[in-house]
Amino acid sequence: MKRVPILLACAILPVLLQAQTKQSSEKKTAPVNQFDANGKKDGMWYSSEAARRGEDAYVEFGNYYHGRRAGLWYKLDEEDQLIAIENYKNNAKDGEAKYYDKGKLICVGHFRGLNPDHSYDTIMVVDPETGYDVPRVISSDRGSLKHGKWIYYDADNGRIVKEEEYQIDNLIFSKEYPLSRADSLFYANRNKNLPHVKNIKYAPPKNKQFSYTDYK
């Protein structure tokens, strides 16, 4: 009689392991283009835009949180080469953004997103006369503003070509870095070893399934 529980456990164990494996696999993927109970976009969304009005076709994907974009959003061209990686908060660009030309980094900038839940938002800026941080009240209908450093790179060699700084969309500093003849040879020799110019493709979700580990 003591053998019955053991035999029963041996029969049930493979079934439990299979169910657990299936559950673990399901956690890695999730359907895209879903809505919440109120009919608002929620979770991972994927969309494509055809070429029009002089703009090239592109695809983009990222997360919605109850109707608002949140976190990293990726934009790619027709060859799955990166065009942009932008961070969103409350449906507005906020924080670091990266822009690419044929998958090569050409710009890193920063946005400040405004809170859409209020008519006005407050942003701290540096007073040019005193050097202290002071609050500025901004209408939230402006969405997001350039705020912070923007650095531009040569797509072929990765060197900095220009640096800018913005405060609430106002350019307060700009400096260009021209390329000398000696620099030209140096950058040409090291070009092929730069990590940002490697041909990395960011394929969009297939079959409306998205693995959250693919884009970390």
Image (cartoon, rainbow, N blue to C red):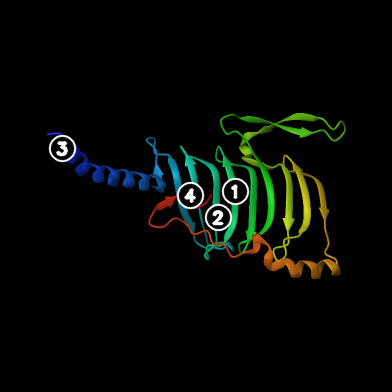
Tell me if mark 4 has few (under 14), some (14-19) or many (20+) residues whose alpha carbon lies within 10 angstroms of its own: few
Residue found 52% across the figure and 64% down from its top: 78
Q: Position of residue 120 (x, y in %)?
A: 64, 30
Q: Amino acid at mark 4?
A: Thr
Measured along the vertical axis of the image, is residue 146 above or below residue 196?
above
Q: Which mark is first along the chain, 3 or 1? A: 3
Task: Judge by depth and name the residue closer to the eye, 121 or 13.
Answer: 13
Q: Amino acid at mark 3?
A: Arg
Of labels 3 and 4, the one closer to you: 3
Kindly give the residue lying farthest to the left in the view shown.
Answer: 1
Question: What residue does disc 1 label?
Answer: 86
Question: What residue does disc 2 label?
Answer: 75
Q: Position of residue 140 (x, y in %)?
A: 62, 34
Q: Amino acid at mark 2?
A: Lys
Q: Position of residue 193 (x, y in %)?
A: 68, 65
Mark 1: secondary structure: strand
Q: Amino acid at mark 1?
A: Glu
Question: What residue does disc 3 label?
Answer: 3
Quarter residue 135 falls in: top right
Cα separation between marks 3 and 2: 61 Å
Quarter residue 82 falls in: bottom right
Residue found 69% across the figure and 63% down from its top: 155
Which mark, residue 213?
Answer: 4
Q: Marks 2 and 4: in contact by CB < 8 Å? A: no
Q: Which mark is first along the chain, 1 or 4? A: 1
Cα separation between marks 3 and 4: 44 Å
90 left or right of 30 in image: right
Cα separation between marks 4 and 1: 18 Å
Q: Quadrant of the N terminus?
A: top left
Task: Judge by depth and name the residue closer to the eye, 118 or 97.
Answer: 97
Q: Which mark is first along the chain, 2 or 4? A: 2
